[in-house]
Image (cartoon, rainbow, N blue to C red):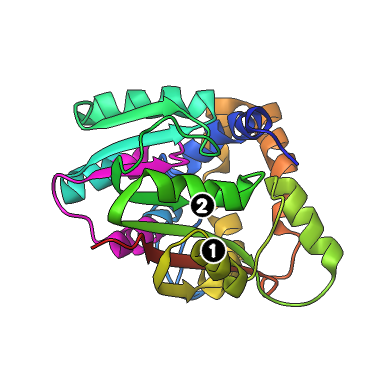
Amino acid sequence: MSEPAEIGEHYDKRSPIGDELRDGQLHMWYWYDRDDDASLTEAVHRMTRKVTDTLGLRAGEHVLDAGCGPGETAIHLANRFGVRVTGITVSRFEIDRARKRARAAGVGDVVSYEYGDFMGLSYPDGTFDAVLALESLQNAPDIDQVFAELYRVLRPGGRITFSDFSLAGQGDPKRVATFMDTLKLPRLPTLPQWLDLARAAGFEVEEHTECGPRVFGRKAKYLEAAMRVQNDVTAKFGTEAVAEFARLHHGFFVPRKDQIGYVIVAARKPGR
């Protein structure tokens, strides 16, 4: 089971090149089909919109971006919805990159980033109107504890949306185990299990979807997109760094495309 410092190191090693490839958002992509001509950056931003739109954000609300990555998602939320965002991450690289990105975007007055472990948050009860956890819960050593903490820091009636990988199809379990080890996943719940985890914490699930075929199922399109910019990335980071990045991610591509799902769940803390 990985500790927060180990997870932070995991992202410190992967995030610099990932940030370059995906324009400040390290989460997954969304392509409709093989003929979808969206770029990798466009496909990743498409996922951002698909997940964050389910929060129903209103101007002036305070959002916790739990596992904020290099910061672009929080900036998107502030600019699109007029909300205040606090992002937390256990990656030192991500905090530094996110703060620079927010200053450059001119949103430093409404977007902040902090080193924080969502297993034990420092915020008082009911601090936030909404919580976004975009591919971050999956790394938690104790998912039940994280859900309890996110429930605690939400006000009554507050909303949460999370997205993560899920176990979808049957098949060679060794392939799934390699995938989980590569991403430092202690568990890989099915969609029903994700819903049960949220409900056990007290959340009322309002919407959910499983879109694995358009996400992990389009991993070939990611590889094609990465190959198109390989020379530019190599020129910036060097051959050895790019080779190490590829080695660290090899296990991600091992499962069959129907074995790994992707869930988006929107829920609410009862209250109003």
The image quadrant where one finds the N terminus is top right
Give left or right: position of 113 versus 34: left
Say left or right for 31 vs 84: right
Q: Where is residue 200 in the image (x, y as percent from the top left)?
A: 54, 63
At horizontal 37% and vertical 29% (from top left) the residue drawn is 113
The nearer-to-camera label among 2 and 1 is 1
Nearest to N terminus: mark 2 or mark 1: 2
For label 2, the residue is 147
Q: Mark 1 points at which residue?
A: 200
Mark 2 burial class by Cα count in 10 Å: few <14, some 14-19, many 20+: many
Q: What residue type is labelled 2?
A: Phe
Q: SS for tag 1?
A: helix
Q: Which amino acid does label 1 sit on?
A: Ala
Q: Position of residue 223 (x, y in %)?
A: 60, 56
Magenta residues span 46-74
Of residues 95 and 62, the one nearer the viewer is: 62
Q: Where is residue 33 in the image (x, y as percent from the top left)?
A: 48, 76
**Residue drawn at 46 percent across, 74 percent down:** 209
